[in-house]
Amino acid sequence: VQVDPLVIALEGESGTADAIARAATLAPISGVSGAVIGQQATAGPPTPDLRPTIDPALGDITPPTVTVQPLPIISPPVFTVRWSGQDNGQIISYLIWVRVDGGDWQLWLETDATQADYTGTVGRTYDFAAWAQDAAGNWSSNTELAPQASTAVQG
């Protein structure tokens, strides 16, 4: 799947906004927590093109697991999405994906948090999926995007 480069506006240490472009290999951005990311796929759901090279000599070659907690069938326009992960080490980053009305998956968040409020539109349905990365660079094995939690927004 070919994916346009991501352009991310981050608040730098100096207080000025830096524009950072990167290809959608989904390699983590060091030191970024809770960045909202926009991505446009040209065809189908995005998947990482490259996995980090894991050195077995480092010890941890086990990928983390991650799940999105179930959502109610019907939600108000602002609702909380929660996810959790398990690993034999430390999970350092979650990538949270959203799909509106069965359309293309979009990367919503890259974060180390385990919940965030999502603002939806009345009459729309939302699917969520999550990936996790541990401190050794292992990505969760569920990189084929499939809904892990879904809800419909009503006013």
Image: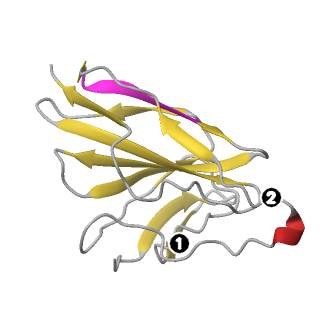
Position of residue 33 measured from the top left corner of the image (x, y, whole percent): 62, 49
Magenta highlight range: 76-84
SS under mark 1: strand
**Which residue corresponds to mark 2?**
60
Question: Residue at coordinates 29% horizontally, 70% vertically from top-left?
Answer: 41
**Element at badge 2?**
loop
Q: Using the image, determine if residue 126 lies above or below residue 109.
A: above
What amino acid is found at the position of numbered circle 1 in the picture?
A: Ile
Identify residue for label 1.
Answer: 20
Asked whether residue 14 is drawn in magenta, I would say no
Q: Residues within 10 Å of mark 2 (few under 14, many from 20)?
A: some
Relative depth, front residue between 115 and 141? 141
Q: Residue at x 29, y 33 (%)?
A: 150
Residue depicted at x 59% and y 61%: 16
Image quadrant in which the N terminus is located: bottom left
Residue 88, percent from left and from top: 77, 44
Q: How many marks?
A: 2
Nearer mark to the viewer, of 1 and 2: 2
* Residue located farthest toward the left when viewing the structure as drawn: 123
Query: Which x, y percent locates residue 61?
Result: 75, 61
| Amino acid beneath label 2 | Asp
* Residue 59 drawn at (x, y percent): 86, 61
Say which mark, if any, is on residue 94. Answer: none
Q: Residue at x 47, y 59 (%)?
A: 143
Q: Is residue 120 above or below residue 98?
A: above
